[in-house]
């Protein structure tokens, strides 16, 4: 199925009239809205694999303003996915680079550096498939979202790596969202907790997504703040509930 407006080309051709009323020989190609939707879906999947399958909800669009600032979020997986999806969609800028990571990814990158240096890596969550990159790679995204409480095994360096990443990004004036959950709150005893980490998060606005937007709203039919997608388009979002299993 292709877009009814552009026939799937991604642009709409038009001719402009010359002052004498004749059509100019130049064909103008204006990007079709379906192209933007496709790019926003691709952006969603680059941010978080599978995020493009999450429905866009109107009431999450207000979170687009928060894409510019650091946040300490408490959220379940579904609320986070819906919020991020709605915020990115409302922002409508496919060039905005956001990335969701978790403690395992932070540690794998950090530990792979050690691994490269020939040191023995004893963290059982270490993922050898993550290519060795400098921890500074986490400075790249315009918005980095760090999900906490994913890592199972305790590694003494985890809190330090988290603080390093947060400090690095703060120094670059780039926002970071740190996400914990109600069942694993970021406080003493949490696998990533440290006094330094807590001190940094104190400067972040704290939002509990599960209380701000009760799960009941998940059932609302998504309507888009952008122009409506043509119904015959193959990329039409349906009102189906999110089936979103990342882990
Ligand atoms: Zn189109």
Image: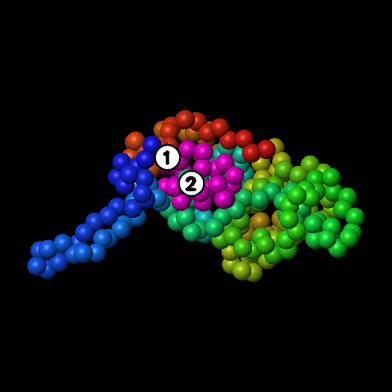
Q: Are marks 2 and 1 in contact (CB under 8 Å)?
A: yes
Residue positioned most to the left: 20
State whether label 2 is within 8 Å of ligand 1: no
Q: Is residue 133 above or below residue 73?
A: below
Q: Is residue 94 left or right of residue 227?
A: right
Q: Crowding near pointer 2: few (<14 within 10 Å), some, many (20+)?
A: many
Residue hosting label 2 = 41
Say if the magenta span includes residue 9: no
| Quarter where residue 245 is shown | top right
Q: Is residue 7 visible?
A: yes
Q: Is residue 246 above or below residue 62?
A: above
SS assignment at label 2: helix
Q: Position of residue 110 (x, y in %)?
A: 77, 58
| Identity of the residue drawn at 27% across and 55% down | 13
Q: Position of residue 105 (x, y in %)?
A: 72, 51
| Identity of the residue drawn at 69% across and 64% down | 136
Q: Is residue 64 above or below residue 136?
A: above
Q: Is residue 192 visible?
A: no
| Identity of the residue drawn at 49% across and 33% down | 218
Specify the label residue 235 is tagged with: 1
Q: Is residue 239 above or below residue 206?
A: above
Whole-number angstrom distance, CA of label 2 to CA of label 1: 9 Å
Say if the magenta span includes residue 61: yes
| Identity of the residue drawn at 50% across and 45% down | 85
Q: Main secondary structure of the magenta part?
A: helix
**Screen quadrant of the N terminus:** top left
**Screen quadrant of the C terminus:** top right
Magenta-highlighted residues: 37-62
SS assignment at label 1: loop
Query: Please, which colouring scheme is shown?
Result: rainbow
State the residue in front, 162 or 19: 19
């Amino acid at each position: 199925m292709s877009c009814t407006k552009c026939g799937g080309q991604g642009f709409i051709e038009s001719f402009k009239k010359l002052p004498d009323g004749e059509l100019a020989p130049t064909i103008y190609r204006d990007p079709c809205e379906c192209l933007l939707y496709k790019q926003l879906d691709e952006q969603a999947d680059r941010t978080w694999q599978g995020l493009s399958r999450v429905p866009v909800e109107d009431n999450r669009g207000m979170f687009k303003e928060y894409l510019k600032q650091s946040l300490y979020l408490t959220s379940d997986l579904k609320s986070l996915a819906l919020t991020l999806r709605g915020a990115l969609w409302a922002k409508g800028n496919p060039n905005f680079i956001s990335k969701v990571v978790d403690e395992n990814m932070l540690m794998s990158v950090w530990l792979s550096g050690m691994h490269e240096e020939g040191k023995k890596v004893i963290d059982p969550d270490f993922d050898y498939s993550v290519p060795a990159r400098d921890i500074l790679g986490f400075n790249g995204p315009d918005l980095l979202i760090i999900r906490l409480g994913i890592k199972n095994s305790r590694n003494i360096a985890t809190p330090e790596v988290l603080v390093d990443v947060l400090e690095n990004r703060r120094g670059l004036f780039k926002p970071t969202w740190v996400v914990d959950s109600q069942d694993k709150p970021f406080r003493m005893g949490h696998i990533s907790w440290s006094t330094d980490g807590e001190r940094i998060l104190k400067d972040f606005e704290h939002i509990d997504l599960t209380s701000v937007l009760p799960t009941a709203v998940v059932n609302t039919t998504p309507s888009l703040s952008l122009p409506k997608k043509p119904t015959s388009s193959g990329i039409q979002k349906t009102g189906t509930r999110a089936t979103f299993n990342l882990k």
